[in-house]
Image: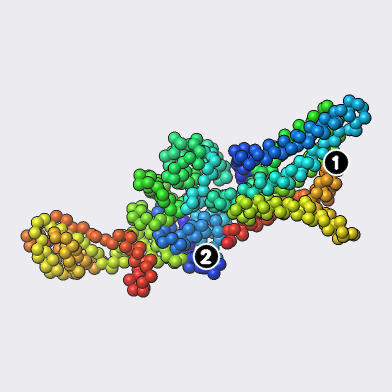
Amino acid sequence: MIQVNGLIKDYGIRRALDNITFDANQGEIVGFLGPNGAGKTTTMRILTGYMPPSGGEAIVAGYDVVEESLEVRKRVGYLPETVPLYNDMTALDYLKFMASLRQIPNAEDRAWETLELVNLDDRATNYIGNFSKGMRQRVGLAQALLHRPEVIILDEPTIGLDPAQVVEVRNVIREIGKDRTVLFSTHILSEAQQICDRVLIINKGKIVAEDTPENLQSRVLGAERVLLRVRGDADGLDVIVKKVKGTSKVEFKQADAVEFEFAAGQDVRPQVAKAVVQAGYELVEMRPVGMSLEEIFLELTDDKPAGKRA
Amino acid sequence: MRNIWTIAKREYDQYFISPIAYVIAFAILLILGIDFAGYFGDAMRNSFQNFGSAPDASRTTSLLAFLLMLTTPAITMRLISEEARTGTLELLLTAPVRDFELVAGKWLGALLYILSLVFVTLIYPILLNNFIEPGLDIPATLTAYLGVVLLSGVFIAIGTGISALFKNQIASFFITFLVFLALWWLVGFPAYFITGSAGEVFNYLNITEHFYNGFNTGVIELKNLVYYISLIALGLFTGTIAIETRRWR
């Protein structure tokens, strides 16, 4: 659905995108992560036909974004970062206007359906200028979904929303992402973790990592880390865990819990559990303590020497 | 084509909630009305005393053309500048709309607003025709109005083109106004000093020449039509190019 190959964008002498390559398939929700100015918006603008790239190619929904820009634009729904709304129109009129630009038959019915989808049908005839930030965001989202596009590109769709609205918007994204391709940018990392099938991390115009949120963790870490908690006295627990073959970096984190690591792919958790129970401890908890996406993100976008990068 | 109409319609509706559009309509109709009242009174008196000449609507159309020159920059300044400032331009540029359709739609919307205003001013020739003997020269009056319509088309096309160049409405306003002043007065000046074909060129470029010595006298001449239509095309072309360049920046 989205195929990007060696995309380059120069703003004057500054190279904003440096040879970006990725793809996204139908039914996939891809998160686009990166610090401000990393090139997320630029990439999205190229994919939506807003601006042409300086080099490389991008195929969206089967059409080249430069050669067949109009065909691409027919098939893409786009919510830009600054939600493009006309304050002096009602939500319904706005959607009807967009529906007629997109040549949708039964514009009015479609506008209503889409307003229902984003839970705004009760405010349909109110002026957008009087809407709260969250409602504006939802009108923008409705505009992006109006023509039921094959590819949906959302630039920071949950920014500025209150927590309840964030959940709502995420649910809508998850729902529509079932049979479409969704590419959305965010810098709220837990969000990417929650709803993305795949995460692309971009920094300074380059993709520094691309994987599922889970795999990213283990790739950065190179090992899996587990927390083990027992009830009551935990003295000597670290010694028991250390004895099990394959564990490393065993250390007390709390009075009743130790953390240890094992190399990715060599799961020693059953052996550890057995050893702990046999030694007479009451095992109450054993869980992975993966690095959060925040830590991975900092790790990958940090300007440290390349050593630890994925 | 449908997109041009969709955009034009939204733009047209926009003017009816815009205070500046009402202010301009009010000002134009007021000034025309005051001028007309004086003329109408004189014409009535003369007509009763049976020594008046036939009434002439070109006085109203020539004043109208001048007032439109002064006010159109305020009508066109926001057309594309405003969309660029609020970010809605990104919406239109990522919708399946050609750049030319966007510019032409904006132009048409503003033109329709001006035409509505011009339509209202038809009341003055109608009054002249009905109350002053022997009535108006109808073809000549219609030709003068055709001139006003074309002139509005030119003003709005130039304004739309310039509005596409700037994010700032005030910049759009002043640049448009300067271009109008240049076309209205400056370009004609050299024609007073330069004789021969070089002077003719300056005279041809002068926008007033084609109206006051052309349409407003009741004459449709090909050179005048060509001049106005080329300027409309130039304005729309500038706008389209400006939007395309915006994409490449």
Picture colour scheme: rainbow
**x and y percent of residue B66 in the render?**
76, 44
State left or right for residue B206 relative to residue A124.
right
Q: Residue under circle 2?
A: A9
Which mark is drawn over residue B218?
Answer: 1
Question: Up-down: is B208 above or below A248?
Answer: above
Question: Up-down: is A253 above or below A112?
Answer: below
Question: Up-down: is B128 above or below A171?
Answer: above
In this rendering, does residue A34 appear at all?
yes
What secondary structure is found at the residue carrying circle 1? loop
Question: Mark 2 belongs to which amino acid?
Answer: Lys
Protein chain holding label 1:
B
Residue at 59% x, 54% y is B167
The front one of A265 and A216 is A216
The front one of A29 and B109 is B109
Residue at 29% x, 64% y is A218
Asked whether the beta carbons under mark 2 and mark 1 sit within 8 Å of each other, the answer is no
State left or right for residue A143 relative to residue A161.
right
The front one of A164 and B189 is B189
For disc 1, the neighbor class at 10 Å (few under 14, some 14 to 19, many from 20) is: many
**x and y percent of residue A11 in the render?**
54, 65
